[in-house]
Image (tube, grey):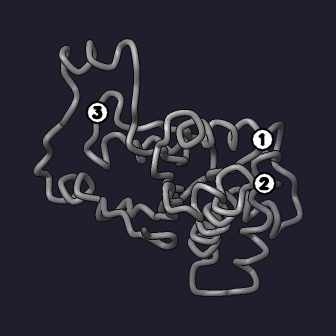
Amino acid sequence: MDGNKRWVSGDLQHPDRDPNRRQLVAQEQEPFGSILSCIDSRVPPELLFDTGLGDLYVMRMGGEAVGPVVTGSVEYGPMTSGTPLIVVLGHQRCGAVKAAYESFRDGKPLPGNLDAIAKALRPAYDQAVKEGGADPVETMSRAQVTLTAADLRSNQDLAPLVAKGSLAVVGAYYSLDTGAVEVLSGAP
């Protein structure tokens, strides 16, 4: 979050982004966090948290949609090297969430494999419809974050790490307008 404060203020340090760091992590890595984020080109976790090489495991997919391969990728850091933090990072004006929302609302499946993303986002859609609100797409985006973070916290392999306090699973939301990350759930 300190890195995000630097991002918002423009006082960037650009840590761990030089040839010395590249050499240091060439043989081994020990990231301090894992970020499950969207593919959106405006939401690069390494930049908006002002981090560098070897600092983060980053998994990006449309709308933070998860399945077995994605979940396995998220599990990798905590289960193999003791990475103590997972952040599920949603964001403002998510195109994948908007497409899924409109697909469900209008009863029209998305083309190709995009429909698989929409299906993975169905629980967030259902929650957004139940909650209501002025902007149902934003409600759905936030619901997707909190539901995914809760699922990871209760995952059979990650839950014991969470219970003993060696892993935090945080749901967070990025504002495209301000650059700020807001913690929604699971703050350690």
The residue at which mark 3 appears reads as 52
Query: What secondary structure is marked by label 3?
Result: loop
Q: Residue at x 55, y 38 (%)?
A: 59
What x and y, as percent, mark residue 70?
68, 40
Query: What secondary structure is marked by label 1?
Result: helix
The amino acid sitting under disc 3 is Gly
| Residue 156 seen from this side | yes
Q: Earlier in the sequence, mark 3 or mark 1?
A: 3
Q: Is residue 143 left or right of residue 171?
A: right
Mark 3–mark 1 distance (CA, rounded to whole Å): 27 Å
Tag shown at residue 120: 2
Q: Residue at x 80, y 70 (%)?
A: 105
Q: Residue at x 18, y 16 (%)?
A: 20
Q: Mark 1: few, some, or many residues within 10 Å (few <14, many ≥20)?
A: few
The amino acid sitting under disc 1 is Pro
The residue at which mark 1 appears reads as 68
> In front of the other: label 1 or label 2?
1
Q: Which of 168 and 8 lies nearest the eye of the viewer?
A: 168
What x and y, as percent, mark residue 84?
45, 50
